[in-house]
Amino acid sequence: MHGFSSQPKRAALLLPTQSGRLGALSLLLLFLTVPALTAQTGSLQERLENAAALIRENRIAEAEVQLQSLLKAAPNETAALNLLGALRAQQGRLNEAEILLTRAAKIDPDFVPVHMNLAFLYLLKSAPAKTIAELKLVIKLDPGNVEANYKLGRLLLTQGQIEEAISVLENARSAQSTSLVFAPLLGDAYLQKGDIGKAEENYLLVLGVQKNNVDAMLGMARISRKRGDPKATFEYVSQARERSSSAELLYKVGVTALELGVFDEAHTALEQAAQLKPDEPIYLVAFGAAEVKKSDLFRSEKLFRRAIELQPNNAQAQMYLGYVLYKQKKLNEARGYLEQAIKSDTGVPEPFYYLGLIVQEENDDERAIPLLERAIQVSPAFANAHVALGASYLKLKDYPRAQKELELGAKLNPDNSKAHYQLAVLYARLKDPKRAQAEMEIIEKLKALDQSGKGEGDVFVISPATPNPH
Amino acid sequence: MLVNFIRKKLHNKSRRLRFCNTLNVILFLPLMLLSLSSIVVAQALKLNVTFDEIPAGKSGITWVHNNAHSSDRYLPETLGAGCAFLDYDNDGWMDVYLVNSGPADFYTPSAALKNALYHNNQDGTFTEVTDKTGVAGGTFGMGVAAADYDGDGWVDFYVTSYGRNLLYHNNGNGTFTDVADKAGVAAPGWSTCAVWFDYDNDGKLDLFVSSFVAYEKSLNILCTDETLSRRYYCVPRLFKPRPSHLFHNEGNGKFTDVSKESGIADSPGKSFGAVATDVNNDGLMDLFIANDTLPNFLFINKGGGKFEESGLAAGVAFSDAGKPRSGMGVDAADYDGDGWQDLFVANIDQEFFSLYHNQKDLIFADEPGEIGAATRMLSGWGLRFFDYDNDGDPDLFLVNGHPDDFIEMRTSTRVKYKEPLLMFENSGRAFKNVSGQSGAVFSREFSGRGMATGDLDNDGDLDVLVSNNGEAPLLLRNDGGNKNNWVGLQLVATKSNPAGVGVTINWQAGGVKRSRLRTAGGSYLSSHDPRELLGLGNARRIENLEVRWPSGKVDKLQNLPINSYVKVIEGEGVARK
């Protein structure tokens, strides 16, 4: 069962990233649980199960008739309210879904499936705090709920609440016999915290028992990268790819490989994923990203166009297509897709940023400034946007503002060679050759990194952990 | 609406007027000007100008470039060669010079190779006079720069090489003598582009010579990959840079190497294209130099024989991400008519070519517009800003070709070894790609390198000569450019430098004022027709024209005949040619 909505919200990116073992825990899975209705008539039980089965078979209209009729007879039947709520969510009618599900939760506050569905619904409504609250309720009601613990830990991690995530996962692990389930995610959490030792301990714990665990291998690849060991990074990524046979796993390996700069492996993994599921926009988009890394803008353009053909409102595909068109200097067409991406999702900074760059290309820096400021408003730590804003001020000869933005951009991303270059130009114009020279020396040092795919971050990376291109 | 209608009428009328006799024009024009006085602005005819190939069978130019191609892929093989339009016998018609490879430490030709000089027979054909004139070369030639360096009234030319360079002094009797050693300009090593200009305004032509990398046979690094299992041409990043040369003309047939004291040698480069222009309007010629895999140089002439490299602060040295690119061909012109010289540099594929708009305070903004998208996958060499349709503003012609003949096998980026030519028309503030409408030759692909412009048939529009690596050159006749009016100037200096480099020409025709600075060098390894061809649009007369010489003299010219060449002598004005 796929997500509620055809709208490609950020959360949707998480869908195919689960390991095979946890595949059943897909974040957007609907809870179609029908509790045993011991106190109720057999026919009610049968009708509920029948409705759930119809939803699973995507026979929505029939399920809806069944549930409406059931609720007419028993308006406070929580299981029916839950099913209808899930169905409405699947139809994209999120507000109606929320009304039905919250009503069910009020009638029976201890009914776990309704809280799980509310958790997923709030994720779709971009309300992660509410999702977290619902998941916590589920864990309170059912402390042994593996999925709720896992998802809460993961969500806290993506929200940057690392300590709390670790606490949830450690508690869940100590209470579970299936403690290995949590180990890769705990490894990720410790890695994010910067505790490489504990991260490695968790990954190795898994690999000791499950030598083909892809999550743990990718975790070890990240550790190797942090330790500056490109050979080991490559080997872990390569092994992970070889052990991945499903599109979902290949996708996960591919995006991680992109993030780690192992581009050939990324390309192979994502190409295989896209071949396995050629009509899945998310794989096409990721494969397109890998093609961009290989400088094949023509092929990536085709992939992004195909993704949009399959899913016209796919904001990510629109944004990335805008990006590759911009890189090919097809500015007018690029602008169109980026504007569409903004309409599809206003909460993403990149389309504003690329629109700003397009306007800069058109030599209209005064008009670029508000676009870049908007990107920064959405994502204050967006280093490239600060650098681009600084570049516009530099061109307009507003040197104090240019300096402020460029220095902030360089601080946010010290590997951004564009920031250092613009600063060098600025200092040269301010007749400060020593500082200009110092900035150029930084660029020289960054060259080696840049060749391995790091550096100015001009080409985007798709990653489940960092869905933003930058 | 009414104005547009009248303009259209005027436009059509002027088309017809071209076929009227002079008397009719004189009678008709004042009436028209009276009635339309409020909109009297020169209207350039929108011409369908094409460049048509003059095949070797017709022109007689049968010479073919030998690039010394080998399986060892020595770098000089792929970087040549240049070409020139020059009038070596002062008959008023442009002759053609083509540079070839030759013996080198890595190459022994199986038969003697020579450069070629073709005499213009004034009927669309050429006759080879290489041996007769004594300009066969004999080095591994790269480029050519022509000018009358000793002011004796006969054009000389300098040939750059991998190895020693040549200075062919024109003996004035149809022969040349190589005087490079005697003059002190042999400049060993690997030289690419050369520019004749007067950096100290002493009235004598000095010489700038671009140096490419430190190279010899033993330094040919093995560049190969798993896909190819064969050698390909190494990226110049792998070789060491060298300082370029600046030679001061002492006026006695000798030059002094002033590279160190001038500051030029302080910046070792891997230099290709070079253009002398005045980017800050201080009356001193500056130098813009394209470097391969190193930042470009902008040498600002500070006076007193000193140059200051200012590329970084000017914003012309690197890409906007701070990366040095592979700069090859260059040129300079005031493309938007704001009175300030703009710069152009062609780079290798995926680096984009740069059109640097002068922001008037030694700062440039890269504003390539449509040129960016058109050149993304191309590698540019010969190029020039010139007014191909005589509408008064400089257009842009680009010659392209990838240096690596294995590029199509080595990458998946759709970059090709042979690439198309491109023509961009100036629309005022930007350039529009008109290659599709400019002739069948633009749908073909070449291993283009050098490019020179010249009016080979003296019909008032600029033709193009393209030199290809390992192939025959391409001679293109401009068809249609002279449907707009024009005037051609042959500048004859008496006090300023003989080439008139640094001259500013201001003219007004049809109510439109225009200005042109006479630059030197530019393109790639090549040398242009030295005459200045001024486009007048459909204006039937030039209201005024002045020539400001570097010496400070100003010649104000009245009642110039249009659609013909005139000789302008410094301090004396016009001598009808």
Image: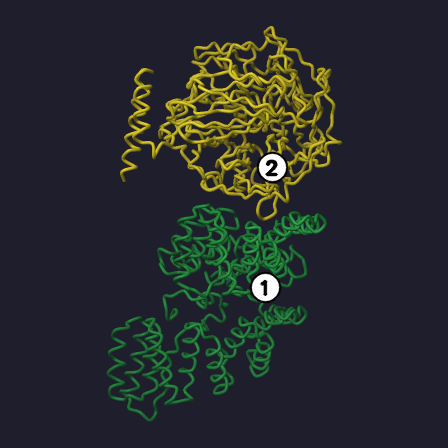
- Outermost residue, right side: B261
Residue at figure coordinates x 41%, y 79% from the top left: A118
State the image coordinates of residue B3 (x, y, percent, origin top left): 30, 37
Q: Of A76 and A272, which appears nearest the observer?
A: A76
Q: Which colour scheme is used?
A: by chain
Q: In which quarter of the image is residue B491?
A: top right
From the viewer's perspective, is residue A65 above or below residue A366?
below
Residue at figure coordinates x 69%, y 14% from the top left: B179
How far apart marks 1 and 2 lie (CA) works out to 60 Å
On the rendered image, what quadrant is the N terminus of chain A found in? bottom left
- Select label 1 or label 2 by which is in front: 2
SS for callout 1? helix
Q: Residue A265 carries which label?
A: none
State the image coordinates of residue B556 (x, y, percent, origin top left): 52, 22
Left/right placement of residue A452 relative to residue A368 reads right
Q: Which mark is residue A217?
A: 1
Do circles 1 and 2 both sit on a common chain? no
Residue that carries the numbered disc 2 in the rendered image: B280
On the rendered image, what quadrant is the C terminus of chain A found in? bottom right
State the image coordinates of residue A121 (x, y, percent, origin top left): 40, 76
| Amino acid carrying mark 2 in the image | Asn
Q: Can residue B289 be seen in this view?
A: no
Chain containing mark 1? A
- In the rendered image, what is the letter of the chain coloured yellow? B
How many tags in the picture?
2
From the viewer's perspective, is residue A152 above or below residue B480?
below
Q: Is residue B52 visible?
A: yes
| Amino acid carrying mark 1 in the image | Met
State the image coordinates of residue B513 (x, y, percent, origin top left): 46, 31
- In the rendered image, what is the letter of the chain coloured green? A
Q: Of A225 and B91, which appears nearest the observer?
A: B91
